[in-house]
Amino acid sequence: MSIKINGIDALQKKLKQNATMSDVKKIVQTNTAELTQKMQRDSQRVLTGHFEGKKFVKPTGATKRSIVATFTRDGLSGHTGPQTEYAPYLIHGTRYMVKRDFFTPAYNEQKEIFKRDLKELTK
């Protein structure tokens, strides 16, 4: 999942009147960092371990540690999410395992905050 802003030229024109690109970079950095923290928090809450046969296996924390933020396009683009190979199976589930989605709730919450922050910047 990602957020794309179409019409970057119109945004830049409006920003020149009201703010600077460094303000946009700060919003992107802040929201990406907050999303990363929320996903890490939710992964700890949702991923509580599993059974292998009759033996309970405690979580290792690998998924939480794999959720890191990266920035591209000179700080105008932020990416975050789990980097483990099996993360999609945790998020979406399988026919043998219920989904343990720690991604979508955090994403939907932060998406609204990001939109609000950008809207305030262009006023």
Image (cartoon, rainbow, N blue to C red):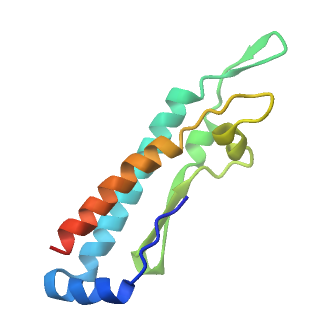
> What x and y, as percent, mark residue 59?
65, 27
Which is more toward the observer, 44 or 100? Answer: 100
Is residue 51 depicted above or below 104 in this figure?
above
Which is more toward the observer, 23 or 7? Answer: 7
> What x and y, as percent, mark residue 50?
71, 21
Q: Residue at x 47, y 80 (%)?
A: 73
Is residue 119 depicted above or below 93 in this figure?
below
Q: Residue at x 60, y 23 (%)?
A: 48
Quadrant where the C terminus sits is bottom left
Q: Give left or right: position of 52 versus 16.
A: right
> What x and y, as percent, mark residue 40?
49, 41
Q: Quadrant of residue 119?
A: bottom left
Q: Residue at x 14, y 81 (%)?
A: 18
Q: Give left or right: position of 16 versus 85.
A: left
Q: Quadrant of residue 97?
A: top right
Quadrant where the N terminus sits is bottom right
Toward the top, the furthest residue is: 54
Q: Residue at x 22, y 85 (%)?
A: 14
> What x and y, as percent, mark residue 75?
41, 75
